[in-house]
Amino acid sequence: MRVRQFTAGLISLAAGMLLVLAAALGAGQSDARAGTGGNAMILTVDGPIGPATLDYLRRGIEKAEEERYAFVIIEMDTPGGLVDTTRDINKAILSADIPVVTFVYPSGSRAASAGTYIMYASHVAAMAPATSLGAATPVGLGGPGAPGPEEEEGEDGEERAPEPRTDAERKAINDAVSYIRGLAEQRGRNADWAEKAVREAATLGAREALEQNVIDIVASDHEDLLRQMDGMEVEIASGSLRLNTENINLERHDPDWRTELLSVLTNPTVAYLLMLIGIYGLIFEGYNPGAIVPGVVGAICLLLALFAFQILPVNYAGFALIALGLILIISEAFVPSFGILGIGGLIAFVIGSIILMDTDVPGFGIPLPVITTVSIIGGLLTFSIIGFALRARRSPVVSGQEEMVGLVATAREDFEETGQIWVRSELWRGRTNQPVRKGDKLRVTGIEGLILKVTPLESESQQTEH
């Protein structure tokens, strides 16, 4: 009986110790997740949001989760970005198991267009003084700086929000409104102003955004941001979490070489130039088999360009027009058409370059000066080829059998019908209908196979005098 009581006591004591230990571990994990004495990662978004930005932020958040950082701060200054890329970034934020704080910093920065959607998706949205956000209308559908629906005036004379003019515009606007309102409702922020930012391209400064419950914090710097975040409760993928930012160590993780390389390759201007080099290289290799260098360089550049185009909003009709234009321009040098192929190719090239990028998002178009410069070079090449063709047509024959007619030869021996003659440092057989002496000057009047028909210059001059 005593043994049983003793055993039961040991079991109870062990169970109690396990419960205490589990509670202690849970508390420790909770404190670590809340940020007590841990590390926070700072990621930087400076410029248009594209595929390189997505790769950088996604890998940064995953690393922060794996290495148990307390939270991630996205330091943002952007004019906007690509729609699909923005949605993918927001997916990474919404599914993150640690808080993601988006901080529009330093003063003078902005979170326009795509940046506004990311602000609404973040667990904590903060801005520095003299910063702004908004203008979230899909570009090209009434957004700032893009052709869109005209503003209308109401009965009171005030301007009303522009109305979409086509079904496609209405679908895009309504989809964007639904998306940003969903983000606002999930984070408990102002959904009505979010809709206004999409429909009317509305913008707000930091103080106004705080007053209208668009953001959570206005902070002058990172220390001020941490101080105001302390004690905030946020909802992450695994549940509710209260932030404790005391003794937090901020670690800045700048874009690495992979991100920088991806950023360069996905720059529309770089991708455009790589495509041109690739096409030219393959064309030159085709016309000069065995040159090797143009083919190797062209293949590498073209593959890099195609890699960039698969993640950029590319109009492949524009790509086809550019390729056709370059082929026609090069063909002008080998099949002279006196400008028809060259000029047609130049027109196709210019049109294709203009419509190549199927977006008006700032930073994701090909600058007009680049298109103009490349087009001028192509035009000069075309007209140079035309000029060479015209000069070649008008110049005398300088090769082949025909160019022998009219040359002056010298007899190498005496002969009455056929004999050896010297023409342009070459020994030929000559035929004449008059006796010829060695050393006489002869005029080549024709050619039959490998025999030149000649006439003595003396008889030629006598015929001229008569």
Image (tube, rainbow, N blue to C red):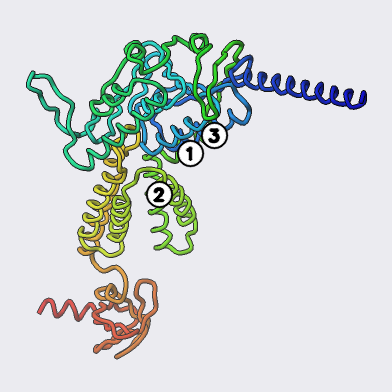
Q: Identify the residue under disc 3.
A: 59
Q: Give me the disc on residue 150.
A: none
- Dot 2: few (<14), some (14–19), or many (≥20) neighbours within 10 Å? many
Q: What is the spatial separation of the Cα atoms under label 1 and label 2, in whole angstroms?
A: 19 Å
Please, what secondary structure does the residue beneath circle 2 have?
helix
- Taking depth in this image into account, of 172 and 398 the one nearest to the observer is 172
Query: At 80% from the left edge and 23% from the top edge, which residue is drawn?
Result: 12
| Tag 3: amino acid | Arg
- Badge nearest the viewer, 3 or 2: 3
- Distance from the alpha carbon under mark 3 to that under mark 1: 13 Å
Gap between marks 3 and 2 measured at Cα:
32 Å
From the viewer's perspective, tell me whether residue 120 is left or right of residue 101.
Answer: left
- Could you tell me which secondary element the residue under label 3 belongs to? helix
Say whether residue 376 is visible. Answer: no
Check the image and report above or below for 433 versus 258: below
Badge 3 vs badge 2, beta-carbon distance below 8 Å: no
Q: Percent x, y for residue 189?
A: 37, 20
Q: Identify the residue shown where x is 26% and y is 22%.
A: 202
Looking at the picture, how far across and down is residue 346, in whole percent?
24, 51
Q: Residues within 10 Å of mark 3 (few under 14, many from 20)?
A: few
The residue type indicated by label 1 comes to: Leu
Type of the residue with mark 2 = Ile
Which element carries disc 1, helix, strand or loop? helix
In front: mark 3 or mark 1?
Answer: 3
Label 1: few (<14), some or many (≥20) within 10 Å?
A: some
The label number, if any, that marks residue 262 in the structure image: 1
CB under 8 Å between callouts 3 and 1? Answer: no
Q: Say which label, 3 or 1, has the lower sequence index.
A: 3
Rendered-image quadrant of the N terminus: top right
Name the residue beneath numbered marker 2.
277
